[in-house]
Image: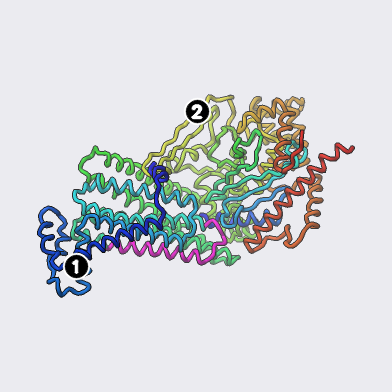
Amino acid sequence: MPIIVLERLPLPNLKTYTGASVLALSACIYYATHIVKDPDWNKPKSDLDVSPSNNEDFINNNTNHSSPDDRTFSQFTGDTFSVMTKEPICVWIMINMAYCWLILIGRCVQKFVFGQLRVSEQQHLEEKFWNFVFYKFIFVFGVINVQYLEEVLLWCSWFSLLGFLHLLSQLGKDRFEYLSFSPTTPAWSHVKLLGLLGCIFVFSLFMFLISIFVGFFQGLNTFAFMSAEVILLGIRTLHVIVRYALHLYDICRDTNGSLSRDTATALEKRGPVIYYIELGFELNALIIDFVHHMHMLLWSNIFLSMASLVICMQLRYLFHEMQRRWKKHRNYLWVLNHMEQNYPMASAEEIAANSDNCAICWEKMETARKLPCSHLFHTMCLQSWLEQDKSCPTCRLALNIESPSDNRPESPEIQHNAPQPARRPLNHFFHFDGSRYVSWLPSFSVEVSQLPRLSRAPNSQLDAMARQVQQLFPHYLLPTIIEDLRVTRSVELTIENILDGRLNSQTLRESETISTTSSNVPLSILQSNVEQPDTSSSQNWDDINEENVENEDGIAVGSRFSKSPSEREQILHKRKEKLIQTARKRYVDKQRTPIST
Amino acid sequence: MAGSALRRLMAEYKQLTLNPPEGIIAGPINEENFFEWEALITGPEGTCFEGGVFPAKLIFPCDYPLSPPKMQFTCEMFHPNIYSDGRVCISILHAPGDDPMGYESSAERWSPVQSVEKILLSVVSMLAEPNDESGANVDAAKMWRENREEFNKIADRIVRKTLGIYIRE
Ligand SMILES: [Zn+2]
Ligand SMILES: [Zn+2]
């Protein structure tokens, strides 16, 4: 909401804003120097000022003034400053100037490190910004319940700085995730981003020291409030840095090419370590956030205020996140344990006999685990797959891993994957994840059920039956057979239908024509081995390929995978153009032939 | 995470470049983002989509190949298994858990051994032989069943559109 309002407001651009701020500040300074020029400015003013205001700090500054005539330059500026701090307009102008500085610094960092922000980063940033402002507003006025303007100002400046670093850290995280999508990011952008993240981390340490210092004078509660946010900032930033380092390590490993057996085993061992580091970061951040909110809730004495309601919502969200993470972790442990007990490491001979790469990551296997169906995978690859599905990736053999609890981790989608009972109604899940919009909105799922259409056998059973039929009649497509089996629910009856020619002849005819053109792809996928398309159909394509080669100028299109990204892009573009051109030509030729004959 | 997904996508890109299946081209739209691909699929011969070159976008998740990519045609499509916004509804693109249509056996669904190439090949076969049970586009499914001639006409118009050929009728 506020974003929309903000967009409609005629916000001045940064240049005019900076100009206006500087102008206002110089006017302010001029005004102050004008007053200070008079040697006796101090006396009447401070007399007037003592009683009503509470700004003791400011008055303290003014108390020990020397005789005005022999003022040095520094004393003069000190006086000017003290005049400015006493004048409310000047104070506001100075605060404005400070924010202007912050924005300018932010702009410089953005220009230097990030360049043009991407749309999603911008949205993320805005969201995070308003979220932060909203929460800190609630904190300052709802929880701490500040009475004096000075206190508000102090908290505001603290949170401005903190929020600024939070936003930068968020931006760094977003950018890291984006950069990790590309294999060809120049090293310089990695260095810049890591440098920024390092700076943020150092700043957060520095701010932690400040919060200790302030807490020393103001008490434990203030310390806890101040430090919680700083620690969160530090943890999040460090998390990104660690992930970044691991990612860079991964990328470098890639360019190094083949691995020795030692490094491969080292990698296998590295998996759990990385997992626990991640878990530690995530859980720590959640727990600190939770405790922080709990503290806020207990501190704000009025339990039924709007503020406490908002905090409760946030607490609920954090609790669910913690629960979710913990369940995921239990699932992880369970799978790990199950794997270690049931799937032995493959022997060197077995790996040697199996010339294929790991089917999950397509990389060479130095060590592997063996499933009961004797398919081999990397331990880490298998682990991450088994966490979400309990079957062999290659042959779909169901592995009897029972979940550690009734509840599967994460979303309801995953709860689906237990074998479905017969007559299970069609269910649709609508999952609303409120936290994606505003972090304190709840997440919920709505299940919409439909009446069962047909009484059906379980899918897996149907599938098995269909395969049985298909073995006898390989030229029938699996879906067609399943279709019929849905009605007959018996292998024998379906076979009878086929023999009597009762099975939808049209589908049969089509499937025949297709099998001559595009090969029986669905089957090949089910068997999960790539079949070469029929040679009968590929002849035409061969012609075109020849044409391609003839037309070739400059870069060779086929049979080369360039190392240079720009060349790859170019080649891909050319191939695409060529495909469309030949298709167009063929289409036109085809249209012509019937007319001429 | 993204690192291993990146390596796998690179390997697939390499394979699809060196050894492309007939009539199929796929690769990242931009080298800066390996998780968004564009694919060109030639309509299979002997079907109403014959000769057309259909562009589609593939969006990969960070945990690819553990989760399937999303596929969406970026040209106009009229097909029982393609939503009107171009999203493709075939079983290979569904994670083993979710089952929006409630009929697929898990054997046909996504698994990490599947690949971009297999997805595109099964899309080709889907173009050739619609599965009118999954009603991603109910109108198209109905027309496919009841008025094949009309369906073929629409398909031909789409084919011409993808090729940029406009013939007066
Ligand atoms: Zn692997
Ligand atoms: Zn297997």
Q: CA distance from mark 2 to mark 1?
A: 82 Å
* Residue where numbered disc 1 is placed: A37
| Residue at figure coordinates x 78%, y 40% from the top left | A516
Which is nearer the eye, A192 or A18? A18
Q: Does residue A161 appear anywhere in the picture?
A: no
Decide: is A266 above or below A463. below
- Which residues, given as a range, are shown in magenta? A180-209
* Horizontal arrangement in the rendering, residue A28 relative to residue A49 (left or right): right
Residue type for callout 1: Lys
Q: Position of residue A87 (x, y in %)?
A: 21, 57
Of the two numbered discs 2 and 1 on the same chain, state the one appearing first in sequence.
1
Residue type for callout 2: Ser
Q: Quadrant of the N terminus of chain A?
A: top left
- Residue A395 in the magenta stretch? The answer is no
Tag 2 secondary structure: strand
Q: Does residue B97 appear anywhere in the picture?
A: yes
Write down the chain letter for disc 2. A
Tell me the crowding category of disc 1: few under 14, some 14 to 19, or many 20 or more residues within 10 angstroms, Cα based. Answer: some
